[in-house]
């Protein structure tokens, strides 16, 4: 949930430790908005990964589709620099290995 006080305009007098200019105040505002957006995206990604792990653990019939959607979400996060590319590769590898181990007995 985006709180209003995080998005309201900041006057130059409220910015501490930076140059006392309009552009510096604007940068603070823009960075706050980007941080909120990135946090929402990270949260959605963590939820997708958790749901995928739960589906794999439960041997769900929809696990392959959930895995495919989760891998797509991880790739999007890496493309938008929310995750480092190596972190994204590691997370995808862990999910696929868990899926393969769970379906090996079928």
Image (cartoon, rainbow, N blue to C red):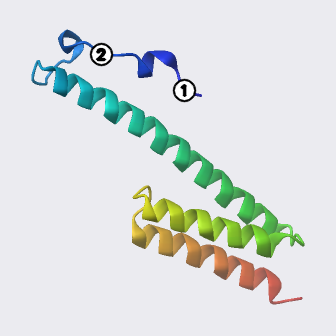
Residue matched to label 1:
2
Residue most toward the left?
A: 19
* Foreground residue among 97 and 66: 66
Residue 28 horizontal side relative to residue 7, left or right: left
Query: Which residue is painted at 23% across and 12% down in the image?
Result: 14
Helix, strand or loop under label 1? loop
In this rendering, would 79 be left or right of 100? left
Q: Tell me: residue 20, above or below residue 36.
A: above
The N terminus: image quadrant: top right
52 shown above or below 14? below
Dot 2: element: loop
Q: Residues within 10 Å of mark 1 (few under 14, many from 20)?
A: few
Q: Residue at x 45, y 15 (%)?
A: 5
Count of picture labels: 2
Residue at 46% over, 44% down: 38
Image quadrant of residue 32?
Answer: top left
Pointer 1 or 2: first along the chain: 1
Q: Which mark is residue 22?
A: none
Quadrant location of residue 71?
Answer: bottom right
Q: How far across and how far down the image is residue 99, in percent?
A: 73, 78
Q: In what quadrant of the picture does the C terminus appear?
A: bottom right
Disc 1 vs disc 2: Cβ atoms closer than 8 Å? no
Left or right: where 78 falls relative to 2: left
CA distance separating discs 1 and 2: 17 Å
- Identify the residue at the far top of this view: 13
Q: Position of residue 105 (x, y in %)?
A: 86, 89
Bin the neighbour count of mark 2 within 10 Å (Cα to Cα): few under 14, some 14-19, many 20 and up: some
Reading the image, the residue beneath label 2 is 10
Eyeballing the image, is 55 above or below 43? below
**Where in the figure is residue 33, as x and y percent of width and height?**
41, 33
Nearer the observer, 48 or 29: 29
Q: Position of residue 54 (x, y in %)?
A: 77, 61
């Amino acid at each position: 949930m985006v709180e209003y006080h995080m998005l309201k305009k900041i006057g130059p007098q409220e910015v501490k430790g930076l140059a006392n200019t309009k552009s510096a105040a604007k940068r603070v505002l823009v960075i706050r908005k980007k941080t909120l957006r990135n946090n929402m995206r990270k949260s959605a990604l963590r939820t997708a990964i958790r749901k995928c792990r739960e589906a794999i653990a439960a041997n769900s019939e929809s696990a392959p589709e959930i895995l495919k959607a989760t891998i797509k979400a991880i790739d999007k996060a890496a493309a938008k620099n929310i995750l480092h590319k190596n972190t994204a590769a590691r997370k995808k590898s862990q999910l696929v290995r868990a899926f393969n181990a769970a379906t090996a007995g079928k």
